Amino acid sequence: MEYDLIVVGAGHAGCEAANIAAKLGSKVLLVTMNMETIAKMSCNPAMGGVAKGQIVREIDALGGLSGIVSDYSMMQFRMLNTSKGPAMWSPRSQNDRTMFSLKWRELLEQNFNIDFIQDSVNQMIIEKNAVVGVETTSGNTYRAKSVVLTSGTFMNGIIHIGRKQMTGGRMGDKASYGITEQLVSLGFEAGRMKTGTPPRVDGRTIDYSKMEEQAGDKDPQCFSFRKPTTIQKQHSCHITYTNEQVHDTLRSAFADSPLFNGAIQGVGPRYCPSVEDKVNRFAERTRHQIFVEPEGWNTYETYINGFSTSLPQEIQYKALRQINGFENAKIFRPGYAIEYDFFYPTQLKLNLETKGIKNLFFAGQINGTTGYEEAACQGLMAGINAHNNINNSEPFVLRRSDAYIGVLIDDLVNKGTKEPYRMFTSRAEYRILLRQDNADLRLMPLAAKLGTISSAEFDTLQNKANNISSVNKIISKKTVTPNDANPILTKYGTAEIPQNYLIDKVLSRPQINYKQLLEINSIKLLLSDFNDAEIEQAEIQLKYRGYIQTEQENVEKLIRLEKLKIDQTFDFETIKSLSLEARDKLNQIKPENIGQASRISGVSPADISVLLVHFGR
């Protein structure tokens, strides 16, 4: 049987790719090494976090499933960074690992354009410089018009625990072989990366009374705009700390650490180091924070966030039991490090298709990223673009000003990465525009044109947008009297008003937010037809109007540069006034426009000026 699309791997990237392409009408085959581990949370059972929560909401707005599955399996919700401005607010959930995986499989099986096969792919079938199918280790051949490769940590994976090594894509699962070697022989450049995971502990052996409780938000939200479901009960997490005794125990085994003795060659994540790496790099610190996080409603298995390690198991035991609350801890599964192959993402186009092989797409950790959210959004974009490719439709590319997803892919393709790439709000220069609260307003109109959301979902969005506009009109035209407002203004430590004031002037005060504004009865009555999200959106637009306008002006400048297209066959060596590095990088990346060229590492503003002159601007 010939398919429109074959997705290799059923992790977070593969699941989003298969679902969205099938939703658009492609006949999809999802190949996984194990049907029991579809969308398995191999590391932390959590979704979202700083910048990552924005990505989950963007995935949902574009028609993906990560937000819906996260809400279904949620054990706790917290909005991070609420003490800062709304550009920094980031939703995060603690999830039931088993429920998460089962829900993903259930939703995928409900899409009858998806077929499944349990097998391992070891070769691409390439004809006339285009991929036309895959071969598996069991000897089967499957043909397709396009292939999305989402290999995760499985390609030539090696697991390290102390001086012990074993092959595997993660603990308990086999590694995958053959694909790296084939693609390297075709001219692709591959590298090695490393990641790790902490031990899982028996919660029955943890003394939580010695730890700080970390409860969820009192008014929890959810990720999904399209199918919002709010958690009814929450499970607390806990916080404890390492100490000098723990650090000494860890140091005593550094000679057996594959991180320090040369056994690991791959580059690890800078922003999520192992506990032994933290002790080594930050020797002046007397303690490090440990988050104790449940793995499910119906299990005592507990994730020890902050204690990722590849030290010998006996050292893991000894050090762990020296931490407050873990004196009698028993380990279900030891921590370990894993090395795996990836391909440098500068070998991709902005639609995630490889430059070397037509209709072959890469998504997820194969591109050098780390994190479920980063993988899932790449899978979504690769699935959409693979479908578009085989239907002769235009590539779907998000700009840096459109979404965090656009920032991530633009960074990978134009700057590349030599270490596991993780998204942060600081990577987005337009983060005031790219907030978690407005992901639906930004992206659902694009999704409606693509056909990845329903007409009913788009109607709901339009109704919300209309309501926000109505709130803005009311607060900009209606006034509040001193008698109504002053008791509340005094309560929250801001000056009283001497006469009737426009509501938006009161709300623009930094001491007053929309919830406090609604304590004024006359205003509560005026806004009684609108929900909290709509009123909060109006507040954000009001308070950050100047910043938003400035960023939009910068975006317009960027768009003007991106309208200046560059012929993909153009040889930059012909422009001798460019720096040597710029010529090399521009010929390697082959930017599609001047805007993209301006973001390539090694291309200076002076080089961009030369390009503008050369192309007649």
Image (tube, helix red, strand yellow):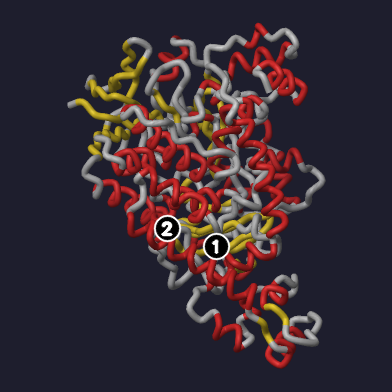
Q: Which quadrant: the N terminus?
A: top left
Residue 414 position (above or below residue 269): above
Q: Earlier in the sequence, mark 1 or mark 2?
A: 2
The residues tagged by marks 1 and 2 sit, at their Cα atoms, a distance apart of 19 Å
Q: Image quarter for residue 210? A: bottom right
User: Would you say residue 167 is visible in this rendering?
Assistant: no
Q: Which quadrant: the C terminus?
A: top right
| Image spot of residue 18 (x, y percent) | 33, 39
For disc 2, the neighbor class at 10 Å (few under 14, some 14 to 19, many from 20) is many
SS state under label 1: loop
Query: Front-most of 106 and 206?
Result: 106
| Image spot of residue 280 (x, y percent) | 74, 38
SS state under label 2: loop
Q: What residue is drawn where x is 39% and y is 19%?
A: 358
Query: Front-most of 386 and 470?
Result: 470
Residue 429 position (above or below residue 123): below
| Image spot of residue 349 (x, y percent) | 50, 25
* Nearest-to-viewer mark from 1 and 2: 2
Image position of 140 (left or right of 491): left
- What number is the disc on residue 96? 2
Image position of 310 (left or right of 233): right
Q: What residue is drawn where x is 39% and y is 21%?
A: 177
Q: Looking at the picture, which amino acid does disc 1 mark?
A: Ile
- What number is the disc on residue 418? none
Residue farthest along the left direction in this orientation: 1
Image position of 438 (left or right of 42): right
Q: What residue is drawn where x is 47% and y is 32%?
A: 153
Residue annotated with mark 1:
206
Q: Looking at the picture, which amino acid does disc 2 mark?
A: Asp
Q: Image quarter for residue 224? A: bottom left
User: Would you say residue 307 is visible in this rendering?
Assistant: yes
